[in-house]
Image: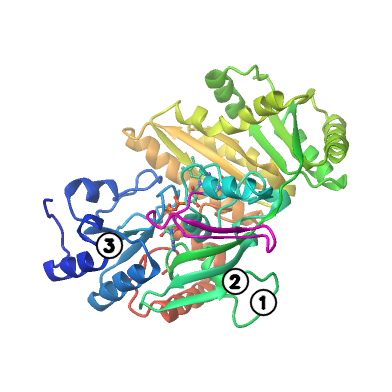
Amino acid sequence: MATATAIPTGLRERLIAVVGRDHVRTDEGALVTFSTDATPLERGRPDAVVFAATAEEVASVLRLANASGIPVVPRGSGTNLSAGTVPHRGGIVLVLTRMNKVKEISDSDLVAVCEPGVRTIELSQAAAAKGLLYPPDPGSQTTATIGGNVAECAGGLRALKYGVTRDYVLGVEAVLPTGEIIRSGGRLVKDVAGYDLRRLLCGSEGTLAVMTELTLRLVPAPEASGYGMAYFPELADAARAVSRVLASGVLPVTLEFLDQVCIGAVEDYAKIGLDTSAGALLIFGQDGNAAVIARDLERMGQACRTEGAISLRIAESPEEASEVLEARRAALPSLSRLEPLTLLEDATVPRSRIAEMVEYIQEVARRYELKIGTFGHAGDGNLHPTAVLDHADEDAVRRARAAFDEIFARALELDGTITGEHGIGIVKLRYLERQLGADHMALLRRIKAAFDPNGILNPGKLGS
Ligand SMILES: Cc1cc2nc3c(=O)[nH]c(=O)nc-3n(C[C@H](O)[C@H](O)[C@H](O)COP(=O)(O)OP(=O)(O)OC[C@H]3O[C@@H](n4cnc5c(N)ncnc54)[C@H](O)[C@@H]3O)c2cc1C
């Protein structure tokens, strides 16, 4: 293989001695492939790509890199949307996808033990085969890995009822940048020995340690699920319906919305008979036994009617339920096909401020002459304003960046956050101090230094 790398030959040979010749790539193809992730407009060329298969191999790679002061960027499937795996300072991209075993599904302890490179869908399927549910379900679940999910604290469509990835991480085995292997937590529901490092590692975006084994909480799978949808004249009506649903004693498994731009884009693409004249669409769902589902769908439908729903549909069969969910699943692909470049963001606000935030996004889109559709998890205030534009149009890219600056500033004014689930990475770094403040940032840096004294692990991300 041709070598085009700044990694010294001696170090390259030592890496090969650790993982084998086939698993150290310095050829042009690999360096280009691993220079990007799912984040548009960000890239950085690595010097080597290393595929480790065990915690011991990870530890040896980190010890070598640490001794040479070479950056290491841990990577699962590279689906993150904050440039968390872009090696913008060069160095080694350490890929964990060879560590892809589900080691155990325990129906007595209600846990799964798996390696970090297991894809989310594989874990869900392994749990389902034993009548159990692993609830976090990011839209990328067919591709993304559990390691990446934990490192980003991924959310998903079921987060309102079941919580996000952090709520399912019971134990972590991780390798420190200096090469020591540690364990935090395990398969116990209760365990308060020491600082809660597994929580700290959850959402640490590959900046503190490389996770090599995860023990995850499972729950009994619900018997069934049911879904419905309601159209509203204005987004504000749908937002009020969200509050009314939550005040009605129902905790839905799904409560998602699409604005008018998204409804139009989905109908144009999927042709599923959506009402494109409506101002907003709310999709709601519940799981459990048949009686609970029927009762809660009725209550949610009533809440929508009270807040002025134009029309309401409750799915009568699994096929109809699938059609209802298709409207939400198709939102991102439908918007993405409108223009070559899709900028998907995740500004998040308290549920009570959703209407205000979406109206502000629409006003910003008009002012900057951009097409921005907003869909998202209405039940937890997690909005995905998505701008579609032509990346060759430099002025449009500049306007989009300025528009998102304003959108994030507004989210903070409304007591929200600059990211609900996609993480900071490189792309949100310039907003982070605005949200956390200087003292908080300084503490993050001290924590980073305690884990990674030479600053080799994913440097320049998440405030490090
Ligand atoms: C179409 C699409 C839909 C999406 N939907 C959702 C969604 O619904 N909810 C959501 O939350 N996100 C979503 N995402 C974002 C993304 O899929 C998640 O952030 C996911 O968790 C990333 O997993 P990954 O395996 O691709 O990780 P990567 O992108 O490879 O890595 C993500 C971060 O984790 C670090 N990392 C990876 N593995 C390890 C490890 N073993 N130890 C330490 N650090 C590690 C990396 O350094 C990086 O900082 C979506 C993305 C796309 C493209």
Q: Which mark is residue 110?
A: none
Q: Is residue 165 left or right of residue 304?
A: left
Query: Who's the residue at 60% across and 76% down the image?
Result: 196
Residue type indicated by callout 1: Asp
User: Which amino acid lies under the numbered mark 2 shown in the image of this protein?
Assistant: Gly
Residue 266, picture quadrant: top right
Disc with the residue nearer the chain's start (2 vs 1): 2
Sequence-wise first label, 3 or 2? 3
Q: Which mark is residue 191?
A: 1
Please say if 360 is above or below 47. Answer: above
Q: Which residues are magenta?
A: 97-119
Q: Which residue is mark 3?
A: 92
Residue at 41% x, 75% y is 176
- Kindly state the secondary structure of the residue where label 1 is placed: loop
Name the one closer to the observer, 39 or 397: 39
**Please, what is the three-letter code of the amino acid marked with disc 3?**
Ile
Could you tell me if the residues under marks 2 and 1 are in contact, i.e. CB atoms within 8 Å? yes
Question: Which residue is tagged 2?
Answer: 186
The quadrant where residue 190 appears: bottom right
Q: CA separation, marks 2 and 1?
A: 8 Å
